[in-house]
Each structure stands twice: as structure tokens, then as C-alpha cells.
Image (cartoon, rainbow, N blue to C red):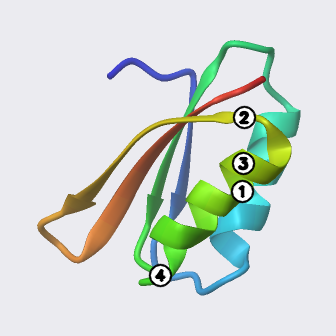
Amino acid sequence: MDFDKEVDARGLNCPLPILRAKKALAEMQPGQVLHVLATDPGSSKDFAAFARQTGNELVSQADLPDKAFEFFLRRK
């Protein structure tokens, strides 16, 4: 998937992956896509809740083989 900006939050625990994503999204234009990589086991639930609360779209999420998680968020 094409994206406009990437945040590598691997190795960071909650709430840092969400905070980094929030900061990155604030710098982006509506419709742009943010790619996030995280290793925090709770990040799947965290990013789903973050998208619901902020109105940004969680386009997709996936579990990667190296115990990481990948998220694509579209800026509202």
C-alpha cells in the first residue's frame, strides 16, 4: 500500500506508538496515509480505539512475522 509518511514505533510501549502516530497525523493533510510499525502487543486494540475516537480511518492492520504489527491510517 502506498503511504505518505511512516512512523517506526517498534520497541516502544504504550502509549508511545499512539502518541507518535498522533503527532505525525497532525502534520499531514486530510486524505494522506500514515504507515505505523509497532511491537507493543496491545497496539492492535489501541490503534482501533484511536481511529474510532479521532475519526481517522484505520485502513488496514496486519501481524508481521517478526512479532511486529503494521497499521495504515488515513488522515481525516
Mark before the other along the chain sequence, 4 or 1: 4
Tell me where residue 59 appears, x and y as whole percent.
47, 32
Q: Which mark is residue 40?
A: 4
Q: Report how far apart the C-alphas of labels 2 and 1 lie in the structure.
A: 8 Å
In which quadrant will I find the C terminus?
top right
Amino acid at pointer 3: Arg
Label 1 secondary element: helix
Q: Is 7 positioned to the left or the right of 28 in the image?
A: left
In which quadrant will I find the N terminus?
top left
Q: Report how far apart the C-alphas of labels 3 and 4 lie in the structure.
A: 19 Å
Tell me where residue 62 appears, x and y as whole percent.
28, 53
Amino acid at pointer 1: Phe
Nearer mark to the viewer, of 2 and 3 = 3
Give residue 14's quadrant in the image: bottom right
Q: Report how far apart the C-alphas of labels 2 and 4 lie in the structure.
A: 21 Å
Label 3: which residue?
52
Mark 1, residues whose alpha carbon is within 10 Å: few (<14), some, or many (≥20)?
A: some
- Check contact, mark 3 vs mark 1: CB within 8 A: yes
Residue at 57 percent across and 81 percent down: it is 12
Task: In the rendered view, tell whether residue 52 sits above or below residue 17.
Answer: above
Label 1: which residue?
50
Tell me where residue 67 appears, x and y as whole percent.
23, 77
Residue at the right extreme? 26
Label 3 secondary element: helix
- Check contact, mark 2 vs mark 3: CB within 8 A: no
Amino acid at pointer 2: Asn
Mark before the other along the chain sequence, 2 or 1: 1
Residue at 71 percent across and 75 percent down: it is 16
- Check contact, mark 2 vs mark 1: CB within 8 A: yes
Q: Report how far apart the C-alphas of labels 4 and 1 lie in the structure.
A: 15 Å
